[in-house]
Structures are given as C-alpha cells and as structure tokens.
Image: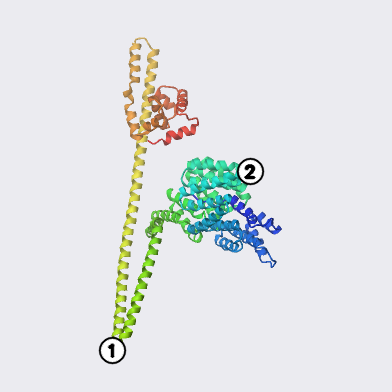
Amino acid sequence: MLKQKISPFVLLFLLLLTGKNYGQSGFSAKEIQIRKIMMSNPEQAKTLVRNFLTTTEKRHDTTNANMYVYYGFAHNLLNAPDSAIYYYKKALGYVDKYPKSKAKAYLNLGISYRKLTKYDTALKYLKLSETLNKEISNKNGLGMVYGEIASVYNQQFQYEKSIDYLLEALNLFKQSNKPDLINPVKQRLAGTYVGTQNYAFAADLYADVLSYFKTVDLKNYYVTLVNYGECFYYIGNYTKAKAAINEALPGLDKFKDTESKGIALAWLGAIAFKEKDFVKGVAYYDKGLKMLYEKKSYASHAIFLRYITDLNENGKYDKATAAIADSEKKLKDTPVGIKLRADLEKQKSITYKSNDAKDKSIASLEKALVYKDSINFAGYEEKLNKQQAQYQNELQRKKNIALAKHNKFLALKVKSETQKKIIVIGLFVAALAIMLAGYIFYRFKRKLENEKMKSMTMSNALIAQQYENEQESNRQLKKSLLEKQSDLMSGAMRLAGVQENINEMLVAVKEKEDGIDADFLTKKLETLIKQEDYWEAFEKKFSEAHPHFRANLLQAYPGLNKTDLFFASLLKLKLPYKDIGRLMAISPESVVKRKYRLKKKMHIEDEDMFDKILLEMQA
C-alpha cells in the first residue's frame, strides 16, 4: 500500500482556520489573496508571503504568525517539509498567548515530521497539540490531531493503533456534525483498511465519501478515485479499477496535480501487467515514476517497489536492472520508512540474482536482513546503547577518581629522581599494557565480525537455495496438474463419443423392428447407459486432478445434490455445451437451462461471478 498523503481538503481546512485561531476578526486583502491561490499555485503564494514579510511596516504578532504558517503550508505543498518545519517554528514564536493557535502550529509540525518519516518527533509534537486541545476543550482540533497520529501509525504499518485513533476522531467530529471533517477521516480510514488488505470494505468507504467530495471538493474527488481504483485492483476487478482511474486523470490534469497523476498512471501500469500487456505496463510505470521523481514525491519508493516486483514476477529482469539504476540518484534524498527499504532491497536481490550479479544480490539481501532486524530490535538496541553509555561513563568516572588518588599518593612519595624514573617506567608499561589490551580487543572484535559475516553469507546462500527449491517444486506441481487436466479432458471427450454412439444405437433399434427383438436390445442398451460404473474412469481422473473440488463446493453450497456436483465438474472443465450435452444425453439447450437452475440453487445471478467461483474453487 502507498503511503497516505495528507488530504488537500484537510490542508485547506487548516489554512482556513489559521487566521481565525490567531485572534483576528478579519483578514487583510493580502492574506485573502494568498489563501485564495494557495492550493492551486503554492509557488506564487510563497512569493507573495515572502514579499509581504520583507516589508518594513509594523504588524501584529498574529499577522506575522499567519504569514509564517502560510509560508510553511506552501513549502509542504511543494514537498519541502524541512523548510515547512523551519517556518512553522518561526510562527511558534508569535503564538504563546494563543493556545489554540499554538496547538495548530504543533499539529503542522507533526505533519511535516511525518512526511520526513521522523515518526518519534512527529508524535512528540502531535502529543503537545493533543494536550493543548484538551485543555481548551477544542474537540475539532483534537479530532484533527487524532487523524494525524493515525497517519503516523499507518505509515509504520501499525494499523490497529491507526484505526483506533481514526475512530476516536470520527466520534469527535460526529458530535459537531461537520461533514467537512467527517468525510476526510472516513477517507483515511479507508486507506488504513487497504493496509490491512480489507479491500472490499475500503472500497465501500471510498464510495461513501466520493459522493460527498464530488459536490464540495472536486480535487479530492479525483484523488480518491485513484484510491478507489487501487481497491478494485487488489480485488481483481481490473475493469472497474481502470474505469475509476481513467475518470480521475482528466480531473487531475485540470487541477495540475502531477503527483497524483503519476500515482494513477503507475496503477494503470500495474493493471496492464496483470493483463499481460507488458509494453503498455512499462510505458505507464515509466511515465508515472518520472512525474513522481520530478516532484520528489513520498510515494516514489512504494510505486517503484510495485514496479520492480511486477518486472521480477514476469521475468523482465533486464528492465528491472535498468529501473533500479535509474532510481539510485532520483530516490536518494526522498524519505522512506525502514520496512519499505527492506522490501525494496529484497526485490533488488531477486533482480540481481536472476542476472547472475551474485555479489550485488547477496549485498541487497544482507541489507534487507539488516533493515528487518532493525525493525524488530530498534527499540532494544537504543535501550542497550543508552545502558552501555551510562555504564561506560560511570566506569570512566571511577577510573578518574582512582587515578587522582594514585597521583596524589605518588606526589607525596616521589622525592628523588630514581622514584621519578620508576614512575615514568611504570606509566610506560601501563600505556604499553593498555595498547596491547586494545590490540587484543581489536583482533577479537575483528574475529567476531568475520565469523558473523561468514554466518550471514551461509544463511543467505541457504535462503537462496530454499527459494530455488520452492520454485522448482511449484513448477513440477503445475506441470503435473496440467498433464492430469489434459488427460481428464481427453477422457471426457472419449466418454462423450461413447455416450453419443449408444444414444444413436437406441434410436436405430427403436426405428427398425423387422427381424430384431427391439424391446430386448432397447432394454439392454438402456440398462448399460444407466450403469454408474460406466463413469468410474472419468470420476477417478477428475478426483486426481481436482481432489477437493466437490467437497469444497458442497461445503460452500450444502443444497447441491450428486447430479449438481457432477454437472458443476463438467462446467469447471470448460467443456462446450454441446459436449456436456453428449455426456449427459441432453440437448445443448437443456445444458443452458440446467446451468441456470444450478445458479439459482447457489443464489448467484451474475454469470461472470458464477464462472469465477467454479474456476477458483480450491481443488
């Protein structure tokens, strides 16, 4: 899942509240002009703010605070969070007397630090904002803080915490009955459910907010359409996914949202890969990533990961290698979470391995392991480092005390040159001993590091071999299944031919009665065609190819009888209606009617859904 961007609607809401929170009854014409163009042209807004701040006229503290906040907003919209932080902190210097405004400044700082993936710092400022909003009973401000805390946890893949905070925010906004606050929270909640892979529920939430955004916030409507299409991509409904994204593209062009358009094009590339149209897929991905690289977008890493994963899964290793080389400089200064780094290095390792670049493959795999270790043990290592530093400081303090006492004792005892020489020799020996001890420690440390490196190399080789074994096993299973399926289809065709010949014999015997005991032969042939042993060979081969199909189908739909299960088996083989009719001694029209009755028993109306269930039912 891509990182959630702060909603343009939320940014606009923060902007509109800025001047009101600083205690002014109205805005100057210059401020109104800045706010009016902020979302559509942040670069021009930044220029206006800079020109305003360079004037020498005397201004109220709240006006200065407003201007620095506007400056921060503009930098945030231009993906320059470092600069945004600088100006938000400048605004803090003017708002000590205005707790509501101070809470808003802390909120903005939290947003910027989140964009830099400095999550601990982001949470620190958001908690400060939470405390101030609680003190002044500002429920709406508190709800917005909870929404941003949720985004921090969401980017760290702590979805349970994220959902808890979003639900808290939703409850607070519902109390004030503000749709302009409620719907952006629902939008974020949908994004979080995408992270938990609950795509159907996420799609429902997106559909709910889309109708609202379409009437009040068209830009967010188009951005949300891209997220909506992403859900359908994961569900596997590529037609709806493309429809949503293609509807969004003209709107994103209209609002000049290059970053969102880049993401949208990348998702079209992912869909094209699923549809095996690799030329179109690569073109979409390359065009989308170029836009994201130019904007220094925080979504660049996630989109790039999706790209090389698709390339690797489809054997496009040369293109994957070229894409990796192209991304090295362009992604260098873009912040990225540690889990995403680990996943990227894992995919790079697969690419390098497939192109026989073993050294690079092992290096990337080692990086991935280090990143994953840091995810698991970051807190432990930080605590350990603090403990070690504390211990080392205490040890040094004791040594210094002991050394001071020793020097004082020597000063009292030393009365002659001989004693001085002894002291010098002693100190030299001590220094030599310390150096020797340091050298022994250094050699011991190097030995440990070498052993650790050997162990890691062996572990990487074992992982690579295990991966290769799994791939070979999967290939053999797939080959075996295809052979059984082919054998089963051939058997079914032969049985259909036998069945048709028997039926023809029955008709011929019934029509020709001279010299033939027609009744006798008719009964014989009718008895033969009804014998269940006749199908044993077919049943056995079907069970070998699809051992659990009928049991799973019956468990999912208990109302089906034996004939229904047999008929469903023939449909799963994708036999033509004519051949199914020959096997069951019925006409093709009767096959269609029987399929209709089976769908009714399974309570399925959609033809595509029915075929998909039979095809994907676990065999």
Q: Which residue is denoted by mark 2 in the rendering?
A: 215
Structural distance between the alpha carbons of marks 1 and 2: 97 Å
- In the image, what residue type sits under mark 2? Thr
The crowding category of the residue bearing disc 1, from other C-alpha atoms within 10 Å (few below 14, some 14 to 19, many at least 20), is few
Q: Is residue 360 above or below residue 186?
A: below
Q: Please, which colouring scheme is shown? A: rainbow
Q: Position of residue 554 (x, y in %)?
A: 39, 30
Q: Position of residue 379 (x, y in %)?
A: 41, 58
Mark nearer the N terminus (1 vs 2): 2
Q: Does the rendering let one see residue 229?
A: yes
Please, what secondary structure does the residue beneath circle 2 have? helix
Quarter holding residue 540 = top left
Q: Which quadrant would the C terminus be assigned to in this image?
A: top left
Q: Position of residue 492 (x, y in %)?
A: 37, 29
- In the image, what residue type sits under mark 1? Thr
Q: Please identify, in this view, whether the residue under mark 1 or under mark 2 is nearer the observer.
A: 1
Quarter holding residue 88 = bottom right
Q: Is residue 291 left or right of residue 489?
A: right
Q: On residue 173, which mark appears?
A: none
Please, what secondary structure does the residue beneath circle 1 have? helix
Q: Does the rendering let one see residue 297?
A: no
Q: Is residue 487 above or below residue 343?
A: above
Q: Is residue 200 above or below residue 121?
A: above
Question: Which residue is at the front of the view, 120 or 464?
Answer: 120
User: Tags 1 and 2 in contact by the CB under 8 Å rule?
Assistant: no
Tell me which residue sits at (50%, 30%) in the image. Answer: 605
Quarter holding residue 358 = bottom left
Q: Is residue 209 left or right of residue 614?
A: right
Q: Which residue is denoted by mark 1 in the rendering?
A: 418
Question: Which residue is at the front of the view, 77 or 255?
Answer: 77
The crowding category of the residue bearing disc 2, from other C-alpha atoms within 10 Å (few below 14, some 14 to 19, many at least 20), is few
